[in-house]
Image: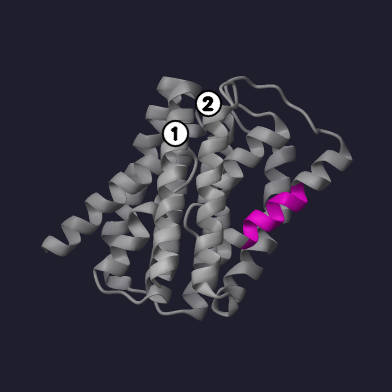
Amino acid sequence: MLEHVLLFFISLVANMLSAMAGGGAGLLQLPALIFLGLPFSVALATHKIATVALGVGATLKHSQQNHTRWPVALIMLGFGLPGVFVGAKAVLSIPEPVAKVSLGILTAGLGVYSIFKKQLGQHYTPKNASALGHFLGGLGLFVLGFLNGALSSGTGLFVTLWLVTWYGFDYKRATAYTMILVGMFWNGTGALTFALLAEVQWAWLPMLLLGSLLGGYFGAAIAIKHGNPLIKKVFEVVTILVGLSLIYNGLIA
């Protein structure tokens, strides 16, 4: 019983921060599942399935704000979903320590980059809306989809910053796209792939799903209420912490 209560609160906090930052639920949730005794592959599959509820919870709140538009949404699905599927199938062939350290350095770098770019993501200045711009943006999303399927932890943060830098979104809009499309559809594709290919700790999922659902909803509500300045700060803290966590786990693996 105590174990299930602990799982709920870990999931609630992790996914609330993720909904505010535009990614990073794996910072607390994935290491916690491993710490509680699950092998990495089982923990990753269980975590991936649980994060689908994060997307559902955040979508319930973000859908009221009308911050998403079909062109970018379709590009995220059309380019991102194949990347997620390929990445989830390729995860077993990637050297885990090297992948974690590399991704950790890149993830922490996102936070440092945002800190030095004071106005990054504070205003909505759309760009790269041409056919070529959308195609190149889609290629970037395919790569991020691959990372999402293969590694899970922190890759939503890359999508959020990609939408800010490439498409000129502010953080509020970028996190809305990330939570809805990555949280529900990318993670859903990864969850289905992992459910078919890997072992899942099904007994732990009810509490993880409940925590993810509520954390996603309340995190999105806080982000919408307080806007871009708060989202930027939370994004910077979460990216640096996720990056350091990945580097540490990669070095001790």
Q: Is residue 230 left or right of residue 105?
A: left
Up the image or down, 102 lies above or below 76; here it is below
Task: Find the distance from the CA under tag 2 to the CA under tag 1.
Answer: 8 Å
Determine if the magenta segment contains residue 144. Answer: yes
Label 2 neighbour load within 10 Å: few <14, some 14-19, many 20+ = few
Badge 2 vs badge 1, beta-carbon distance below 8 Å = yes
Up the image or down, 153 lies above or below 150; here it is above
Residue found 43% across the figure and 67% down from its top: 251
In magenta, the rendered stretch is 138-146
Residue 225, given in percent of the width and then of the height, sits at 41, 21
Residue 65 badge: 2
Determine if the magenta segment contains residue 120. Answer: no
In this view, the residue in front, 179 or 136, is: 136
Q: Is residue 179 left or right of residue 164?
A: left
Say which quadrant the C terminus sits in: bottom left
Residue found 50% across the figure and 28% down from its top: 64
Q: Is residue 57 visible from the viewing direction of this image?
A: no
Say which quadrant the N terminus sits in: bottom left
Q: Is residue 129 left or right of residue 40?
A: right
Dominant secondary structure of the residues highlighted in magenta in the image: helix
Residue 83, given in percent of the width and then of the height, sits at 67, 62
In this view, the residue in front, 186 or 59, is: 186
Residue 220, given in percent of the width and then of the height, sits at 42, 34
- Residue assigned mark 1: 61
